[in-house]
Image (tube, grey):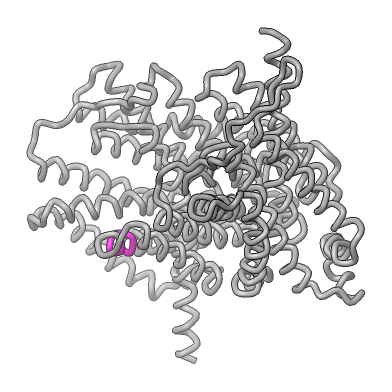
Amino acid sequence: MKSDQFSSTNSNRLYQMIIPIVLVGLALFPFSEPPVYFISFVFWIFLYVCLSSSWNLIGGYAGYLSFGHVAFFGIGAYATAMFGKIFSLSVSLTLLGTIPAGLIASLIAIIVGYPCLRLRGPYFAVITLCFAFVSQLTVKNLEILGGADGLWLKTMDVSVEINRTIFYELMLALTSVTVLVSFLVGRSKFGAGLRAIKEDEEVAQTMAVNAPRLKITAFALSAFFPGVAGGIYACYLSYIHPDVVFDVNMSILQVLMALFGGASSWIGPVVGAVSLTVVNEGLSTFVKAELARIIYGCLFIVVIVFMPNGILEFFSRRTKRIDN
Amino acid sequence: MNSTLIIQSLISGVMMGSVYALLGVGFSLTWGVMKVINVAHATFGLLAAFFAYTALQAYGVDPLISLVVSAPLLFLIGCTLYHLLIVRITSAKAVIVSSMILTFGIAIILENLMLLLWGADPRLFTTSYTSKVIIIGPFYFQYPPVIGFLMSIVGVTLLHLFLKKTYLGKAVRAAWQQPDASQLCGINLKRISAITFGLAVSTAGAGGLGMGLLYSFEPHSHNLWLIHLFLVVIVGGVGNVLGTALAGVIVGVITGLSMAFLPYQWVNLLTFGLLMVILVVRPQGLFQSEI
């Protein structure tokens, strides 16, 4: 129902025109020779858009709030790094290895999701949070994965600008695919099934929605993109550490971004991720880090109290009221 | 492996666990009664620990005495927070999830306030009795855990008696069992919820102080404490005070034993793994859920 306001024919035609322009603009952005800082900054925005959009598949559509999605990001990063290390691949081949790394993340999501997706609401949130901690600690304790020392990856033999541009374009591609998948799922029968689960799982099941299967598919799909993103991120940093790629704050952040924008549509997480990343960056440039985080905390409170369905719906409701 | 070591780690496990229990009962109560998961619960405990730390360093006030001030203060903070923020989300469809995000915001604010005020260094209570021990036979008892243990017994017993014997406590239980019917019987649900929340936050203060007696603490410590909270409350059954207390002791014993026989970095892994297993196998808790 909520997605209808974004898919009426009129706005649809508008989107068909705007989206390619925006995408081409974004793809050409690094060639206008901006400072490297901006390329990296937009890379971060893409990363968060990708993470929160893929989270939205299970968290937003199906209403299963996974607080441990960073685990898949970390698994993807480590899988990619290990591919590179074991087969001593060059950087470009390692980047190709991000796709099997994403598949590994999906596989683990299926294994973990099978028992976990039977739990609902806060219990699911807690168990996924635990899963993030468990995977972080496991990696930290396994010497074969570098343990607490982290892992080094090969770096490319090119200038910083070109290096950053390559990763920028890769992340842009991944993010576009993620958002596209999120959009298509939202409009498909699969997405309708997930929404039915969110509304009422028992009723959905009596209406012949195969809830366990849909949930696990959505969970595996939503783990794939963070896995690939983790792999790209690992090559981008060229050094990974369990505290960095399994950072639980990151997983909480992607949940908040999706909820901030509005978790019931495909555009919500995009808006949420872009706006929160910009706000966060702006705040931490101008004020002390602690103060910035306090303001950030206040933002969550304001959003959840005054706009429980996200800023998009809040503002669209506002404009409707004015129109009437 | 000798029996003295096992019994010694059992004893320290029981003492640790009792403090987890004290920290957990309030969390269990808000979750069970109000359907509010207060993610900032451990953060309030940490706040009380820092308050006690300052009182001790600056004025030489014993941590236990500082509780006389901090517990009522936290009660007021809890009531105010309830009336200002939490009451607004209780009508939402997904109260539990909304409350998690709301209180997560509160936790971020508090954590960074503590970072601003006290810095990121780990702190430890150093009182006159910190290093003292009682030796009974082959076993030794350190003073701080013993104090934490006694504090927990008093705290949990008082809360239990409050819920079972007083009118207000009975009202809290009634509001939990039948929110609508209790209102028909003249119970002011809003007031009862505010009191429950305030009470829970002030027991968090006592629990945080107990944790401070056992471990060193810094502004980020509440994250680890929170996982223990979830473990204790889920094992004990949500809303079940005595179950939570018992679960605290069980978790404490397991942690104590694993600390004695496992390398340190595996202890937390065991705790988290245990929570996952319990969630999958028996999410309703080990004990019958009854307030």
Residue shown at the point (25%, 27%) measured from the top left: A94
Residue B258's spot in the image, x, y percent?
62, 22
Residue B145 colored magenta?
A: no
Give the extent of the magenta segment: A279-283
Q: Nearer the viewer, residue A266 or B212?
A: B212
- Would residue A172 be found to the left or right of residue B33 on screen? left
Q: Nearer the viewer, residue A2 or B109?
A: B109
Residue A50's spot in the image, x, y percent?
37, 50
Q: Nearer the viewer, residue A109 or A135?
A: A135
Q: Quadrant of the N terminus of chain A?
A: bottom right
Residue shown at the point (47%, 57%) measured from the top left: B108
Dividing the picture into quadrants, the one containing residue A127 is top right
B104 versus B287 height, above or below = below
Residue B70's spot in the image, x, y percent?
62, 60
Residue B149's spot in the image, x, y percent?
72, 38
- In the image, farthest residue toward the top: B1
B122 versus A314 height, above or below = above
- Would residue A214 be found to the left or right of residue A108 on screen? right
